[in-house]
Amino acid sequence: MITLVRRVTAGCVLSAALTACAATPQPVRPAPSATTTAPSAPPTLAPGPGGLTPVFENGSRTHGRTVALTFDADMTADQGARAAAGEHFDNPGLIAALRALKVPATVFMTGRWAEQYPEQARSLGRDPLFEVANHSYSHYAFTDDCYGLPTVSGDRMRADVERAYAAFRRAGVPDARPYFRFPGGCYDRRALKALTPVGVTAVQWDVVSGDAFATDVEAVTRQVLEGVRPGSVVVMHCTRSAAPTTERVVRAVVPELRERGFRFVKVSELIGS
């Protein structure tokens, strides 16, 4: 289920035929050089007041004309029957458009979506153009009264986020980012405290695209173009059934923002800048 957001919110698998390897001596690989360095960890924000999970809404307004397009791959825990009946919670055309336009992006994915579309989740997670981040497992709300979403109890919030990361690993996503987006964008102090042990940075946005349930491509395009500023985070959706205009919006927005001098980046670059 996709919900509208308020404007104020802000490996390959080894073959089984390995028996021949047991009889064939294998070359000994040299030990790694002492100068080899491990990949750097993704940037995160320091904990907020009282050690609470930090919240990121936008990047620097003065360090260049950068903008991050983010896409929520929403599917709630109880929508399996709808997917089995033919409803599309994925949007391959949108992803193809981003690849064709060479636009880096961050996909906030629910664990249930990764279970429903493991090949697509794996493809996104292994494509350097994209980064996969956490949008909960269930897409249930972390506060009461959040656009009619079912609610996760306080003692299950951490487990719901960790369950999503486990679903990503099973799907073959090698390195999901330590970023979390609250379903519906709804959070409070209790939710931030519950997620502190997970070590994530909560990522919100400063530009609401309005693509959820929208049918007017021009209106959504105009809303994005009017809202973007240097360092902006734009929230959009990666679900055909509930955000059918998004691919066309992206094809219109990207060249216009590039004409205005904007450079597209992932959320990790904004946080790290």
Image (cartoon, rainbow, N blue to C red):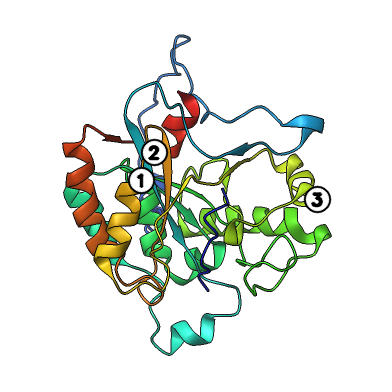
The residue where tag 2 is placed is 266
Q: Earlier in the sequence, mark 3 or mark 1?
A: 1
Q: Earlier in the sequence, mark 1 or mark 2?
A: 1
**For residue 168, side relative to residue 237 (left or right):** right
Pick whichever, 271 or 34, lies toward us.
271
Q: Is residue 219 above or below residue 180?
A: below
Structural crowding at the residue carrying mark 1, measured as other residues with C-alpha within 10 Å and reported as few (<14), some (14–19) or many (≥20): many
Q: Is residue 155 above or below residue 263?
A: below
Which quadrant would the C terminus be assigned to in this image?
A: top left
- For badge 3, the amino acid type reads Arg
State the residue at coordinates (41%, 33%): 231
State the residue at coordinates (49%, 36%): 58
The residue where tag 1 is placed is 105
The answer to whether marks 1 and 2 mark residues whose Cβ atoms lie closer than 8 Å is: yes
Residue 190 marker: 3
State the residue at coordinates (26%, 66%): 217
Pick whichever, 140 or 211, lies toward us.
211
Tell me the mark number nearer the camera, choosing from 3 and 2. 3
Q: Position of residue 223 (x, y in %)?
A: 34, 55
Instruction: Count up the numbered dots.
Output: 3
User: What is the secondary structure assignment of the residue under circle 3?
Assistant: helix
Pick whichever, 8 or 133, lies toward us.
8
User: What is the secondary structure assignment of the residue under circle 2?
Assistant: loop
Q: Is residue 227 visible?
A: yes
Q: Is residue 79 above or below residue 246?
A: below
Structural crowding at the residue carrying mark 2, measured as other residues with C-alpha within 10 Å and reported as few (<14), some (14–19) or many (≥20): many
**For residue 212, side relative to residue 202 (left or right):** left
Residue found at the very far top of the displayed protein? 35
- For badge 1, the amino acid type reads Ala
User: What is the secondary structure assignment of the residue under circle 1?
Assistant: strand
